[in-house]
Amino acid sequence: MQLLQIKVTQSLFERLEQIAILRGCSNILSLVYQSLEATAADLAVLEKHRLQALKEKAEPAPLAAPRSNDFGDYHKSKLTPEKRQRILHLRESQNLTPGELAARFGVSKTCICLLLAQHQPVVTIPTRPHGGGRGPAFESSK
């Protein structure tokens, strides 16, 4: 057994004495022992459950089957140039929504929206002539 010394304030000591009396302990030391034993028991139960869960760990669920798309492959990271052209064609001819196109080609809706944004016609607005502004404060004498 090892000796443990703890310094506490007078008010904390008095409160511990009250708790010891309420719990039926003869003194503070028996209250501390009782509390430590309960904590150790709780930790032992938790460790037992943790080890049991590790032993009974279920096999990982099988991966979901890939979604089918027009080209028969499932590759979300890149769209081939052919797929990009097909998406643009379907958007114009059948007026499919980005969500429908994303589901059809197995990519995210964001991917489709970015692709469509890249191929929007560029509208240029002519610049307006300079309004003139304030004239010079001093005129040069030449």
Image: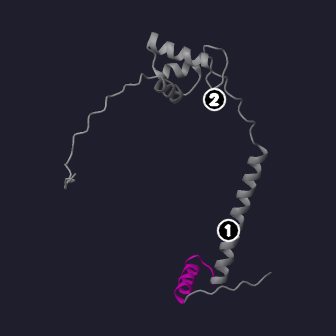
Q: Is residue 57 left or right of residue 35?
A: right
- The residue under the point 50% across, 13% down is 90
The residue to which callout 2 is attached is 77
Q: Residues within 10 Å of mark 1 (few under 14, many from 20)?
A: few
The residue to which callout 1 is attached is 38
Query: Which of 142 and 79 lies nearest the eye of the viewer?
Result: 142
Q: Amino acid at mark 1?
A: Ala
The residue range painted magenta reads 10-27
Name the spot of residue 10 as percent of width and height, x first: 54, 89
Magenta region includes residue 25: yes
Query: Which of 18 and 42 lies nearest the eye of the viewer?
Result: 42
Q: Is residue 8 left or right of residue 37?
A: left
Query: Which of 122 and 13 lies nearest the eye of the viewer?
Result: 122
Name the spot of residue 101 as percent of width and height, x first: 51, 19
Q: Secondary structure at mark 1?
A: helix
Q: Are marks 2 and 1 in contact (CB under 8 Å)?
A: no
Q: Main secondary structure of the magenta part?
A: helix
Can you name the residue that lies furthest to the top here?
93
Q: Amino acid at mark 2?
A: Ser
Closer to viewer: mark 2 or mark 1:
2
- The CA span between labels 2 and 1 is 54 Å
In the rendered view of the protein, which quadrant contains the N terminus? Answer: bottom right
